Image: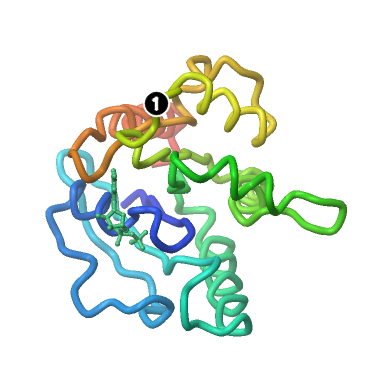
Amino acid sequence: DAEVVFLGRSNVGKSTLMRELTGHDFTTGRKPGVTRSPNHFDWAPESFMFTDLPGFGFMKGVPESQREQIKTDVVRYVESNADDILAGVLVVDGKSVIDIIDRHSGPDEVPHDVEMFYFLDDIDVPAIVAVNKMDKVDDRDERLDDLCDRLGLYPPWQQWQETIAPISAKRGSIGPLKEALRTHFHDAKRDDLL
Ligand code: GDP
């Protein structure tokens, strides 16, 4: 089966999104940084295998060393399975992602989300950015154009609908992500990767 991996900082709504996509509850018994191993789930109508990778970045009560370890584990998992991975869905919080990226950009610092986006590109895993919590965002087009800019994609964002998927997992509005996944699925089939 084609594998789709989900990665993102903690609290961006990754569990909510995966529950919406699969009907499985990913939150039960899950504490930040504790569930270290990937969870696998199948998805009809296409036969994807969905892998939930642990959330990285800041987590209250989780020491820096453990956070670094989680990120290393995520990177290792994606690297070692890259050949079978159809797409990497990087989930971000649409309301805060620009502020967080800008706060952590500097001469010696690359923000986690930007780093992960480039990492996927480096190892030839197609990246889909699921821009979640769009229900909380007023200046939608401007926000999505800013995100493109930070990720090195030329705005307007509408040119990147296979890559930028504005959604609201909590409201069940995840159509753009499903569309992007289908596109990658069909591209892969056409290229005989599946
Ligand atoms: P995870 O740590 O990335 O798995 O995040 P969770 O799925 O546990 O969600 C973190 C918080 O964000 C919860 O309070 C969710 O209810 C909330 N949340 C998730 N998706 C959305 C969304 O689309 N819109 C809004 N407003 N809140 C959301």
Q: Residue furthest right?
A: 107
Tell me which image quadrant ligand 1 sits in: bottom left
Kindly tell me whether mark 1's CB lies below 8 Å from ligand 1: no
Left or right of 149: which side holds 78?
left
Please say if 7 is above or below 96.
Answer: below
Residue at 28% of width from left, 77% of height from top?
A: 30
Q: Position of residue 11 (x, y in %)?
A: 39, 60
How many residues crowd around disc 1 within 10 Å: few (fewer than 14), some, or many (20 or more)? Answer: few
Instruction: State the residue in front, 141 or 80.
Output: 141
Q: Please indicate whether residue 96 sits to the left or right of residue 133 in the image.
A: right
Q: Residue at x 56, y 76 (%)?
A: 67
Say if 19 sits above or below 135 in the image: below
Residue 69 percent coordinates (x, y): 59, 79
Q: Residue at x 74, y 49 (%)?
A: 105
Circle 1 is placed at which residue position?
138
Residue 106 in percent (x, y) is at: 81, 51
Q: Quick check: 192 left or right of 76?
A: left
Q: Amino acid at mark 1?
A: Asp
Number of numbered discs on residues: 1
At 38% from the left and 50% from the top, the residue drawn is 4
54 sits left or right of 100 in the view:
left
Q: Residue 166 lies in what quarter of the image? A: top left
Residue 42 x, y percent position in the rendering: 21, 55
Q: Is residue 177 above or below residue 156?
A: below
Front-most of 103 and 156? 103
| Colouring | rainbow
Q: SS at mark 1?
A: loop
Q: Is residue 175 above or below residue 86?
A: above
